Image (tube, rainbow, N blue to C red):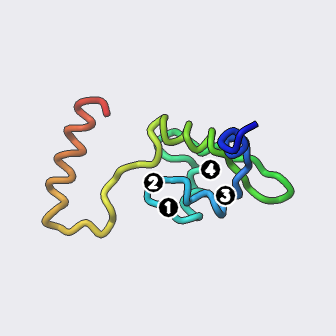
Amino acid sequence: MDEEERDEDEWIPLARAAKHFPGRPHVATLYRWSTRGVNGRRLLTALIGGRRFTHHGWIRQFIDNGGPPTAPSPHTSSKQRPGVEEAQRELRRLGL
């Protein structure tokens, strides 16, 4: 088994999994994605020895199936909001 195959099967503690996501979300975000989900999707995890783990395949599946939301940051300025809201309406109209 080569190095890349081993990495694919390796369990990753959720506390360290953020580095495998674009933008490196906070660990609390990963826990939320695994328990409550986001937009009807959940990050798959396993509880092993009292710790929560995921692995590369589940991370890839979560991202490939729509991944984390792309909503605007709550810090979006009031000048930007109308444009963001218009873009979101257009995306909904297109079914995205």
Distance (Cα) linking label 1 and label 4: 13 Å
Q: Amino acid at mark 3?
A: Leu
**Most foreground residue, 77 or 52:** 52
Q: Amino acid at mark 1?
A: Pro
x 43%, y 59%: residue:
23
Residue beneath label 2, please?
22
Residue type, numbered disc 4: Ser
**Mark 4 in CB contact with mark 3 (< 8 angstroms):** yes
* Mark nearer the viewer, 2 or 3: 2
At horizontal 41% and vertical 48% (from top left) the residue drawn is 69
Rounded to the nearest angstrom, the CA distance separating label 2 from label 4 is 17 Å
Label 2: which secondary element: loop
In the rendered view of the protein, which quadrant contains the C terminus? Answer: top left
Where residue 3 appears, as percent x and y from the top left, is 69, 44
Q: Is residue 53 left or right of residue 37?
A: right
Q: Residue furthest top?
A: 95
Q: Quadrant for the N terminus, please.
A: top right
Residue type at numbered disc 2: Pro
Q: Which residue is mark 1?
A: 25
When the figure is inspected, residue 75 is found, relative to residue 96, above or below; the finding is below
Q: Which residue is mark 4?
A: 34
| Viewer-closest of 74 and 12 | 12
Q: CA distance from mark 4 to mark 3?
A: 9 Å
Q: Residue at x 16, y 47 (%)?
A: 86
**For mark 2, does the 10 Å Cα neighbourhood hold few (<14), some (14 to 19), or many (20 or more) residues?**
few
Q: Quadrant of residue 95?
A: top left
Q: Secondary structure at mark 1?
A: loop
Q: Which mark is residue 14?
A: 3
Q: Secondary structure at mark 4?
A: helix
The tag earlier along the polypeptide, 1 or 4, is 1
Disc 3 is placed on an element classified as helix
